[in-house]
Amino acid sequence: MFKMKVMNLSHTAGCETRDETRQKDHPMTAPAVSFEVFPPRSVDAAFKLWDTAQALAPLAPRFFSVTYGAGGTTRDLTHDSAHVLHRTSGLPVAGHLTCVGATRAETMDVAHKFADAGVRDIVALRGDPQAGTDKFEAHPDGFADSCELIEALAKTGKFTIRVGAYPDPHPEAANQQANIDWLKRKFDAGADEALTQFFFEADTFLRFRDACAKAGIDKPITPGIMPVVNWKSARNFATRCGAVVPDWVDQAFDAAIRDDRHDLLATALCTELCSELIDEGVDSLHFYTLNRAELTRNVCRALGVTPQVALADVA
């Protein structure tokens, strides 16, 4: 499998990729896309965020999402970044909101500030443990879990609510069925759409999608896609969040790094993954950009997602 994948995906300048050949023979419908960014903590990081947003906004994403730092460490930065991004791009922006380290009133105050700023999309999450702890502990006056937060947000009637989902079981889930049952509870609480954690093989998502449908989940589940900017970091993150790393992916990146072909392989593998999902009926993709636009933009271009230029812009 490893050899077949690498042979199909490796190419040199002037040669067509398998996806380019397939698009000529069987043109596919370009998917709807959305992009995740994280709030900056420095001036340099702020420039990188805005450069990323400017590069990707012309692709007409459904929305940008702005993450919430581990332990709620970027709550104000998330709000400010979401507000500015919405105001400057004119596009929908989804602010992340977690249950960590805050009372119910404080958490809902952040939600209302999002709404006041025109941000009417929220990604509602339980959140990671606070710094210095190894497991989530609810604030005595806070939301006990993501379902309670979702219910409170839904009652306001102000937001489109998105939630997380795990094609590979969440590290704290007893098993995959418990993982799916919890996702169903989120939808029953008022969630509108799920965005999945990233994964490396299309079958991982497709099996999860089928299992969710069998469990009676009929709301959208959008696959999360992460173009690999840095393999070492991506692999470490995958280990922490429970995403299974196939041996052939590990071997492919080890070889590509030795041959100075990391970005070439990352783009090819990601494009192939997305193409397989689209072939199986997936019509929306959510990209984890890590505030780096180039790889994501290249993958989108290969999938037929091109800049939307108004006539006024080319006069």
Image (spheres, helix red, strand yellow):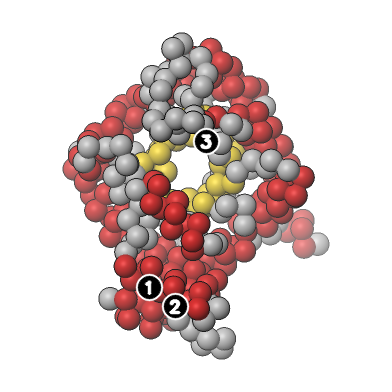
Determine whether 302 is above or below 191 in the image.
Answer: below
Amino acid under disc 2: Ala
Q: Which residue is drawn at 71% across and 37% down?
A: 84
Q: Mark 3 = which residue?
A: 70
Amino acid under disc 1: Gln
* Dot 1 or dot 3, earlier in sequence: 3
Q: Mark 2 = which residue?
A: 255
Quadrant location of residue 177?
top left
Amino acid under disc 3: Ala
Give the CA distance from mark 3 to mark 2: 33 Å
Quadrant location of residue 293?
bottom right
Q: Nearer the viewer, residue 165 or 190?
A: 165
Residue 1 shows in this picture: yes
- Pointers 1 and 2 in contact (CB under 8 A)? yes
Q: Provide residue 203's location: percent of width, then percent of height.
A: 28, 60
Q: Residue at x 21, y 41 (%)?
A: 175
Q: Provide residue 206's location: percent of width, then percent of height.
A: 28, 55
Q: Residue 178 carries which label?
A: none
Residue neighbourhood size for the residue with mark 2, other residues' Cα within 10 Å, grouped as few (<14), some (14–19), many (≥20): some
* Dot 3 or dot 2, earlier in sequence: 3
Determine whether 39 is above or below 230 in the image.
Answer: above
Determine whether 174 is above or below 307 in the image.
Answer: above
Quadrant where the image shows the N terminus:
bottom left
Which element is circle 1 on? helix
